[in-house]
Amino acid sequence: LTYEGVEDPSYQDCRSTKQPLKAHRFCFACGEDRHWPMSCDQVQEWKDKIAEEIGDVEEEMNEASYSDLAQKLWIKTNTRPCPECNVPIEKDDGCNHMTCTNPACRHEFCWICRKGWNLHGSATGGFYKCNIWQDDSGAKGGPDGISPSASNDVDQDLGGSATLDDQGFGTAIHAAREAYRTRREMARFLHHYTRWEAHGESASLEQNMAMKVCERMAPVVKAAIEFDGNAEFNFGGKGLSFVYDAFTELSECRSVLKHSYAFSYFRYPGSSSHSIRRFLNMQNRRREKTTFERLQSELEVLTEQMSDVVARSHLRASQIQITFLTAKAAEKRDDLNNL
């Protein structure tokens, strides 16, 4: 049986030249691709939110400018600028550890948050802190010099029995506060959306590599058989199943991580949300958010490590190490699913 429980006699035969059978994973309720931990209604709500905030690209084009526009759209869609030298960089494998291709730069950074890779180590408090939305709306002095707390104080001075959001309605302070709230909410949406897109993009690249395991591993299998000298050599009787298992688990982790960001967008509103007062009174929800982000971050660590090992041009770890990473990633994914 394969990692997904599909019967395939050649799954554990390293000499097999065909890709193993794969199960088709989908949501039985809505017919869409698997989307845990989101509900079917949340998936549709998230799609509507993306359409509302991102929208379709609408721009008049003429024949003379079409090629230039197509090139710009391709660069915008498929690349991101290096944070140091701004050279466009295309991501061609699943790992989010990037190195600038500019020979004069070679800056190492995280594809998701675009900050230095040296900020993603155990010495800086743990990997992948960029998974957490840092809501700094309570900091001194917001955009345009308006501090949210200061504007609230001014509203309190206006008196009346209206709610905090309605106090000072129609004034410049109220307009500034609304504009500030809108910008903060957009920033929070983009934080979750970019990570949703990043994990989806990584999953697509890793899937492409998973479909070529037999082709990529053929020279390794041949060399291993010659080195062992045993005509029946089969990697301990398991063939290349440990590589297939890793790619399958990698796909599962990417799906959970991708949808976890859309889930947390709705589950844990920011302080600029109108529902913040209700949220602040829900102490259990706040503790849940802390635990959720910790498990999400830990799963990202294991997922990126596994991607760095198997989703490259060649394997970068031993059979035992890959098997161990796969098991730990599955265990952490279950922890997040069961939260």
Image: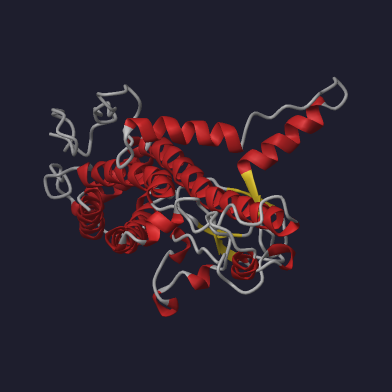
- The residue positioned 53% from the left and 55% from the top of the image is 163
Q: Which picture quadrant has residue 147?
A: bottom right
Q: How many marks?
A: 0
The extreme bottom residue here reads 123
Judged left or right of residue 264, residue 34 is: left
Measured as percent of width and height from the top left, residue 165 is found at 57, 54
Judged left or right of residue 88, residue 44 is: left
Give the vertical position of 178 relative to 70 (above or below).
below
Give the vertical position of 181 relative to 155 (above or below).
above
- The residue positioned 60% from the left and 63% from the top of the image is 159
Give the vertical position of 328 relative to 210 (above or below).
below
- Nearest to the observer: residue 13 or residue 44: 44
Give the vertical position of 307 relative to 75 (above or below).
below
Measured as percent of width and height from the top left, residue 27 is found at 28, 27
Measured as percent of width and height from the top left, residue 100 is found at 63, 59
Position of the N terminus by quadrant: top left
Q: Which picture quadrant has residue 184?
A: bottom right
Q: Is residue 312 visible?
A: yes
- Nearest to the observer: residue 250 or residue 223: 250
- The residue positioned 41% from the left and 39% from the top of the image is 209
Query: How did the renderer colour the structure?
Result: secondary structure
- The residue positioned 70% from the left and 53% from the top of the image is 175
Measured as percent of width and height from the top left, residue 237 is found at 11, 45
The extreme right residue here reads 64
Q: Is residue 222 visible?
A: no
